[in-house]
Image (cartoon, rainbow, N blue to C red):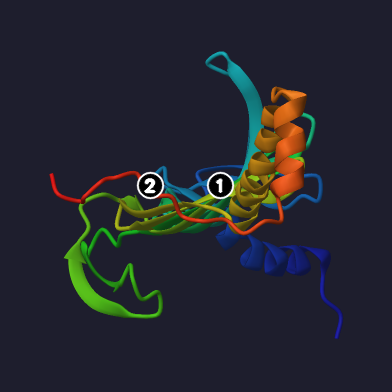
Amino acid sequence: MKCSAGFLFFILMFFISPLFSQCKTYQLDAKHDTINCTDLQNHKQGYWYTKVVNNHGEPGYQESGFYKDDKKEGTWTRLNLIGDTIAEENYKWGCKNGVQRYYNLMGLIREESWKATNPENPYDTVRVYDLNIPDKYDLKVVRVDAASVKHGTWTYYDPERGAITKTEEYVIDKLVSNKKSLATLNDSMNALKKLPADSISAANKNKPPEVLEYEKNHSKKKKYKVRDGATGVD
């Protein structure tokens, strides 16, 4: 059966027109896909790409991600104007939710953990961990007044070495733990271990030769406790 060109055009427009009728305004990307759609209620919908050249004196950026009813949803990526990733953020109900990562030109500098609140239900059940027993926690129902709160582990990095420099633990916007990373602690301990030897060497350099000779000759002899005459009574 043959179909006229007009009939085919009518069928094609029957399927395509609802897609565009949902958008009051929109743009087409290089592949002619619809982006930056604004619906009849002026709500942003679907995939959006924006580029900001001058951000009130701050460096410009470009970002992309999805909108749902005028609110950011899912993963959003932000780049600088030359194409380097500077942020990977996750959203729910238009608010930060889950892990957010931030970068500079050297690499990852910070991981944040956020919790978004359902605007229709401001109460949430959260785990409140025991500070002395890491695996022990209680479930508590709390009211979350803010749209998005710090919740979980925040990790700070040295981008040049890729090493963790500090971690923070939050429960519903309250800091419950602030500690240095194991690597930083090990560095500190190693530095402390070097101090006594260095201090002794420095002190020895200032000792008279006679004292050094005496200590050398008596270093292996048994040491005795010396009483100072104190009675232990104030």
Q: Which mark is residue 37?
A: 1
Q: Nearer the viewer, residue 183 or 79?
A: 183
Structural crowding at the residue carrying mark 1, measured as other residues with C-alpha within 10 Å and reported as few (<14), some (14–19) or many (≥20): many
Q: Give the residue type that dot 2 points to.
A: Gln
Q: Is residue 227 visible?
A: yes
Structural crowding at the residue carrying mark 2, measured as other residues with C-alpha within 10 Å and reported as few (<14), some (14–19) or many (≥20): few
Say which element carries label 2: loop
Q: Give the residue type that dot 1 points to.
A: Cys
Q: What separation in Å lies between label 2 and label 1 (alpha carbons)?
A: 11 Å
Q: From the image, which quarter does the C terminus lie in?
A: top left
Say which element carries label 1: strand
* Coordinates of residue 5 in the picture (x, y in percent): 82, 65
Question: For the point 23% across and 63% down, which residue is it?
Answer: 120
- In the rendered view, would you say 232 is above or below 128? above
Question: For the point 33% across and 67% down, which residue is it?
Answer: 131
Residue at the spot of label 2: 41
* Coordinates of residue 157 in the picture (x, y in percent): 63, 46
- In the rendered view, would you say 227 is above or below 106? below
Question: For the point 69% across and 65% down, which residue is it?
Answer: 10
- In the rendered view, would you say 4 is above or below 70? below
For residue 184, side relative to residue 208 (left or right): left
